[in-house]
Image: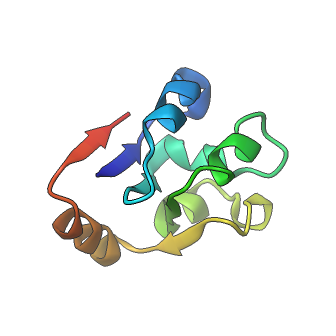
Amino acid sequence: MLHTLMKSPFETNVSLVISMLKKSDDFLALQDGVLIALKDNIFLKSIIMSPVKLYLIKEDVYARGIRKNISREFILINYIHFVSLTLKHKKQMTW
């Protein structure tokens, strides 16, 4: 399953999101969801300990000026790779 976080993690039940992640899943943050990757935020340790690959939409990271402040545990991707993830996962959950 592809889990997409579009809202700020401060407006989302991140504990619930993390509890739903399985090893075969992927996690993608976009729009304000990219804030979950900020270094030293309260959600970072939990999300990077999850068993999934972590992705961020590069354009959203740059638009918010946070590139230098995000965890290296996240992979920056573009929208073409986003489409590839949607094709890889038949099921998706938007948070």
Residue 52 rendering spot, x and y as whole percentages: 50, 58
Q: Is residue 43 above or below residue 38?
A: above
Looking at the image, residue 76 sits to the left or right of residue 73; the answer is left
Q: Is residue 79 above or below residue 38?
A: below
Q: Residue at x 76, y 45 (%)?
A: 45
The answer to which of 36 and 24 lies nearer the viewer is: 24
Looking at the image, residue 54 sits to the left or right of residue 88; the answer is right
Q: Residue at x 50, y 63 (%)?
A: 55
Looking at the image, residue 59 sits to the left or right of residue 68; the answer is left
Residue 42 rendering spot, x and y as whole percentages: 77, 34
Q: How is the image coloured?
A: rainbow
The answer to which of 57 and 43 lies nearer the viewer is: 43
Q: Residue at x 46, y 74 (%)?
A: 77
- To which quarter of the image does residue 36 belong? top right
**Residue farthest toward the right in the current orientation of the protein:** 40
Q: Is residue 78 above or below residue 34?
A: below
Q: Residue at x 56, y 30 (%)?
A: 14
Looking at the image, residue 26 sits to the left or right of residue 54; the answer is left
Residue 94 rendering spot, x and y as whole percentages: 31, 38
The answer to which of 26 and 70 lies nearer the viewer is: 26
